[in-house]
Image (cartoon, rainbow, N blue to C red):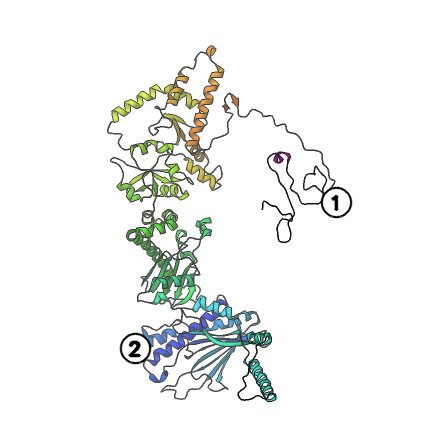
Amino acid sequence: METVVPDLASSDIFLRELVSNANDAVEKLRLTALTDDNMWNGDPLNITIKAVKNEDGRGGHIIISGKGTLAKSGTSEFLATAEGQTPDATASGNLIGAFGLGFYSSFLVADRVTVASIPPKSANVPEPTQYVFSSSANDASFEIFPDPRGNTLGRGTEVTLYLKPEAIEYLEEEKIIELVNKHSSFSSTFPIYLFTTRTEEVPDEEAVVKSDHSETASTTTDATEMSLDEDEAIVEELTEESEAKESQPPKMKSVVVEEWTQLNVQPPIWARTFLIASPEYTMFFTTFFKDFTRPLAWQHFSGDSGSGVSFRAIVYLPGKIPEEYWQQPLASKSKDVKLMVKRTFITSDLGDHGLPKWASWVKVVIDADDLPLNVSRETLQSNQFLRQLKGIIIKRLIQLFTKIFEEDPEKFKEIEGVYGSIFKLGAVEDIKNRDKLASLTRFTTTTRNETTLDQYLENKKKGQKQIFYLAEMGKKPEDLAQSVFVEKLHARGYEVLLLTEPLDEILFGNLRQWKNVPFQDVAKAGLKFGDENENAEEEQEEQKRLAEKFKPLLEWLKAEAKDLVRDVVISNRLVKSPCAIVAETGGYTANVQKMMAASNAKGNRGGILHEFAMKAKVLEINPRSPLIEGLLRRVENLPTDEDEKDQESEEELQEVASILIDGALVRSGFEVPDSNRRSLGVSETAPTDETVKPAPPVDPELPLEEEPMPILPPLDEEDDGKAKVILSEEMKKHISIEMEEIDDDEYPAVKHDEL
């Protein structure tokens, strides 16, 4: 005993074990009766639980009864024997246990346990005797003796637990109901009843009878005293007292109602094979998972794990993702995968074999027909099924999403609204299922409100060798579509994916390509449309001409912006905007820098490489912009001779360039660094006159009671105590108010002829 009990888990499991044992005993009786009619006469089979408190309230005992007989340790042995005798009969047997040690969990909560049991009459035992097994938690022995009470059970077993002082909470009805609902509400095919008591208010019939007797006696006395003729009519007057007496509610009294309440009313719908209506699935979801939002979808299936363990399961898509999940999605842990064995709840903690973070929100009930367990039923002895279980659930979950995606587009819109970010997180985290999850993602583009990656490729232009995208988290798609980076792409009719969620760019960074077509961030240098080879010579000549023409401006801007960009080049992406700042191939885009800042990343994350990526920017200028052409003329007109240099003109031109570059930073999504920039010839850092009038000196004295602060301004005339309206001098010029008294009926005291 001392070896077994410490290995058991929480003391809550004692009731689960005893209910499972009772179910096995009753089920064995039912199965055996299929071949021996004398074993059972057909009366109802059930399991009962009764908690009895001591009169002093300091302790008590629990009685668990079943119509079957206490079985020896060996459910598997019985099942094997029964299968050999009646294979068809035992195929539907719901035998839970595979060992007999679960009974000893009773000593987790009880000092002493007695078991009274009597088998049914049979050919081998025509006159059975009721015996009692008795043992204490601290004893190394037990007793078995004939029950001195005689045959009190008729047939079956009764287990009585005399609870320890620290376990008296298990005498409360609410606690018993909680444990049965958690572990055993679906485990037994037989009704589980709990003896309950409640107090009700009912009419006091004894008080009513006494009142009737007194009224009858009074009426008889009055009739005797009165002498009336036979023809004389009797007129009975109703007084207020008699009316009040008739309308007086009946006297009530409190009575204690005792009844047996069934705890396992709802059947396990996952075990049913016939058609189940949608409301039943929804009701089960609400009651079982305590989630009152309507599930969006579910899948009911059965199968074999491949290791010899068959199971039935239901996978639910909840109506919403909990807010706490999105606060720390990578720290989330699945807690709603309810693993059951023979309808008995075992655990919702799958340990190292739990679902991945992206799917930790899913709600699943899975019932294995057989599974090797240890004494406590809390830790599985074999991890193979758990490893397979994880893959089974994920496979079914993705199948459910894909089926709705292909068969019900309207339904998938609703699902995508809840799980759109989940698909992206899953594609990042789950390498094995990355392509399947990424195919479900949808994005807004410059030409469509939503599209999948496959649909994008169906719409790509001839020669296009990249999937164009632009990312800026937190921005609306319609605003992002106006970005300087997509001006020429949009003007030429190319479609650009607009990524506005933090996960989007992380997803594309992990995917790198889709169906062998790489992704191209249009906010980075090296933008290619795909049709450059059609007029390659002409375009090269044009680029050379523009580079030569704007060479003075390029060199001058490169010197002015050397602290912000690494190079200044002629742009092939701009149409209307004069300039833009793009990230080099190995540099950070503005969106990546924002994500790093939002995650409170330290400045020196990657040393030299991080610093390089932060500064790897290129300033692209639009050679067709009038502003750029005008700036070119100003630069070309700058005097080269030291004696002819105009310091004020050069500073003004530098200020124009500074404003131009800052505007490019803003339009490109980057932060504008602090600078000593001049504006309209005045330095932004020039000192400002900050002189203000100081407050009066400190005055710690408090106002006296006889000097209250005036609520209203002082009156110009003497206060006569009458009600009046006080107007300012300005209002008196526009408003005239006259007041007069009214009487108790709210009429003017002085009558007016005009009224």
Where is residue 674? Give x, y as percent.
Answer: 50, 29
Is residue 619 something that shows in the picture? no
Report x, y in % for residue 45. 40, 78
Residue extent of the magenta highlight: 725-735
Q: Which residue is mark 2?
A: 86
Q: Residue at x 65, y 45 (%)?
A: 740
Asked if residue 631 lies left or right of residue 168, the reply is left
Q: Amino acid at mark 1?
A: Glu
The residue sitting at 43% across, 69% down in the picture is 184
Considering depth in this image, is 437 or 373 the residue closer to the camera? 437
Q: Position of residue 243 (x, y in %)?
A: 57, 75
Vertically, is 444 above or below 556?
below
- Which residue type does callout 2 highlight? Thr
Which quarter of the figure has residue 371?
bottom left
The answer to which quarter of the image holds residue 568 is top left
Q: Which is nearer the N-term, disc 2 or disc 1?
A: 2
Residues 288 and 409: in front is 409
Q: Residue at x 41, y 88 (%)?
A: 127
Estimate how packed mark 1 is, as few (under 14), some (14 to 19) or many (20 or more) residues with alpha carbons within 10 Å: few
